[in-house]
């Protein structure tokens, strides 16, 4: 490995360490309470080194938001684009969303369960949600549109946006409660997910 390659590998490793440390602190302590100094201390570098990689806390958070939505979108887009019937794709997409959230609790909590930041005052973060977040949601909306065009939804369900938002708030509820209510006597996870998806699909299908 050349010196240039080693330096590149080191920079990428440090950048990843910064993002991992920031994610953990944002989830544990909240975005507002976490300082650049605290992130640098967790990584084991100086704040000055951290500023070589990011402009500040908003740019770190924006990168975390974009990377998490990208990971989620890759899974959802693969289901959106296959050739299975719409309801089959919708079932698998709802499950994939839930499983992503439960398998990546810190990533999910950072996106949707730590609302202590003012997005209007943090343009990079707001842009990340508007761009990557809405692109990810569009995967669900497209399958809902495909289902409407295929005539498999109830007649009164003519808005893909309305159905997609309704389904999303439902599956988000399961994910957020599973993450935030560990002490509740939940039934086995797969059974719970299956029952929720069954109920949702029976509510929209003809």
Image (tube, grey):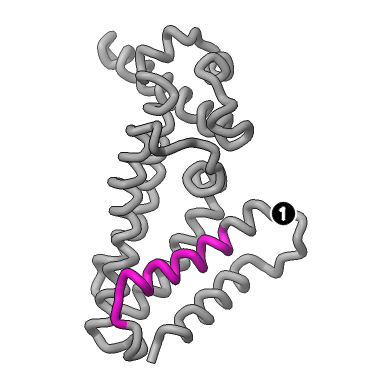
Residue beneath the point at 45% across and 28% down? 19
The C terminus lies in which quarter of the figure?
bottom left
Examine the rendered structure and indicate whether residue 121 appears above or below residue 53: below
Magenta segment, which residues?
A: 158-175
Residue 187 placement (x, y as % from top left): 70, 69
Residue beneath the point at 62% across and 71% down? 192
The N terminus lies in which quarter of the figure?
top left
Q: Secondary structure at mark 1?
A: loop
Examine the rendered structure and indicate whether residue 161 appears above or below residue 111: below
Would residue 165 be counted in the magenta stretch? yes
Residue beneath the point at 24% across and 74% down? 83
Residue at which label 1 appears: 182
Judge by depth and name the residue closer to the eye, 139 or 134: 134
Residue 81 placement (x, y as % from top left): 24, 66
- The image quarter containing residue 58 is top left
- The image quarter containing residue 6 is top left
């Amino acid at each position: 490995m050349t010196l240039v390659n080693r330096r590149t590998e080191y920079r990428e490793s440090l950048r990843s360490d910064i993002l991992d440390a920031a994610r953990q602190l944002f989830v544990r302590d909240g975005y507002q309470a976490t300082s650049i100094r605290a992130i640098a201390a967790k990584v084991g570098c100086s704040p000055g080194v951290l500023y070589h990689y990011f402009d500040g806390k908003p740019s770190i958070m924006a990168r975390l938001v974009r990377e998490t939505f990208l990971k989620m979108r890759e899974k959802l887009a693969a289901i959106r684009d296959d050739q299975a019937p719409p309801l089959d794709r919708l079932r698998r997409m709802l499950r994939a969303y839930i499983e992503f959230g439960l398998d990546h609790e810190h990533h999910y909590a950072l996106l949707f369960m730590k609302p202590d930041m003012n997005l209007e005052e943090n343009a990079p973060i707001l842009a990340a949600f508007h761009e990557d977040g809405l692109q990810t949601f569009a995967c669900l909306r497209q399958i809902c549109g495909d289902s409407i065009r295929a005539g498999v939804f109830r007649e009164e369900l003519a808005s893909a946006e309305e159905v997609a938002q309704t389904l999303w708030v439902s599956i988000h509820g399961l994910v957020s409660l599973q993450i935030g209510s560990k002490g509740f006597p939940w039934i086995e996870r797969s059974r719970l997910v299956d029952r929720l998806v069954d109920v949702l699909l029976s509510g929209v299908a003809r």
